[in-house]
Amino acid sequence: MAYETNGKSVEADEEGFLVNINDWNEDLAGLIAKDEGIDMSPEHWEVVNFLREYYAEYQIAPAVRVLTKAIAKKMGPEKGNNKYLYELFPYGPGKQACKIAGLPKPTGCV
Amino acid sequence: MEEEFEGGIVKKFMFVNRKAPYGTVYALEVLEMVLISAAFDQDVHVAFLDDGVYQIKKGQDTKDLGHKNFSPTYRALEGYDIEKLFVERESLEERGLSEADLLVDVEVVSRAEMAKLMGEMDVVMTA
Amino acid sequence: MSTLHTVNKSPFERANLQSCLGHAQDGDCVLLMEDAVVAAMAATALAPKLADAAQSVKIFVLGPDLKARGLDPAGVADGIGVVDYDGFVDLAAESSAVHAWL
């Protein structure tokens, strides 16, 4: 599939994950989020930006368990827990937030 | 060597890396296997010997290859609770490398100690 | 309990066998198979090394792989046992773990 943004077509796989992470920008993130039924709030952006920083440092999309722990470490336990993250991303922070962040599907996620 | 843990059996696994990165796909495939294994709450060990020590050499830059540099991912293992990383001293020395050349915290062990560790595992996967 | 190590690469091309022998513990078994069977022959330059290793580990070679390569089991070095597929299965079953040096 592909996303159409600013008159440009951006290639994605059949599940909507970007083929090339360098195609990502904030407008595109908003578009992907809309496809996922998510209206991006500052809280959503916080997680998406965290994921992009994690990817820049480690070159992988973290497993949900690892993401939750890393968020707890950086932003505190009130955000680093499943309930908070699933409320933001009902179909799974791993899958949905990674997709919006332009990252590949987390390793080990089926 | 096995113990019951939350209804499941915990086994001692060791993933042994013997090949340099990029020339073949083995190093990346083993790394993915290690990351996936973390989801199963097993006692995971990762070993680097022979040319496998090159996988965690500092300063890798693959831009000109057009190949992803996956060496930073070894530093993510700690966050996956995979903290038992072993490197064989003889393999480092044969290649003129030392612990200071490695991009991740490891335990450097002798070949004899590595052999003993391998013997203590329930499952050893080498590539 | 002992480990069965399997090696399937020629020692003239790769260091798998060398590394395996460097990590096998006393009493372990090493099975030479596929391209590694060449290492079992008495006439190779590696024979002294294998004879030395055979002091502490039990070395076997897979007969069908010798045969396929035109190598005569009679030419296998003393101290190295020739096994068929059933023998391979027995070795694996008698070991606590199998370690394939791919």
Image: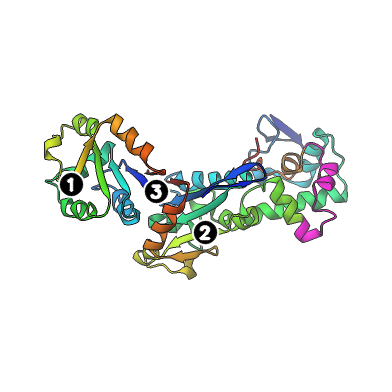
- Circle 2 — which element? strand
**Do the residues indicated by labels 1 and 2 lie within the same chain of the protein?**
no
Q: Can you identify the residue that label 2 sits on?
A: B85
Residue A1 colored in magenta in the image: no
x and y, in percent, of residue B107 in the image? 50, 65
Residue C10 is left or right of residue A83, and the answer is left
10 Å neighbourhood of mark 2: few (<14), some, or many (≥20)? many
Quarter of the image for residue A18 reads top right
Amino acid type at image mark 3: Met
User: Is residue C69 placed above or below B76 in the rendered structure?
Assistant: above
Which chain is indicated by disc 3? C
- Circle 3 — which element? loop
Which residue: 30% across, 45% down? C30
Q: CA distance from mark 1 to mark 3?
A: 22 Å
x and y, in percent, of residue B17 in the image? 44, 51
- Circle 1 — which element? loop
x and y, in percent, of residue B11 in the image? 54, 47
User: Is residue C82 placed above or below A82 in the rendered structure?
Assistant: above
Q: Can you identify the residue that label 1 sits on?
A: C79
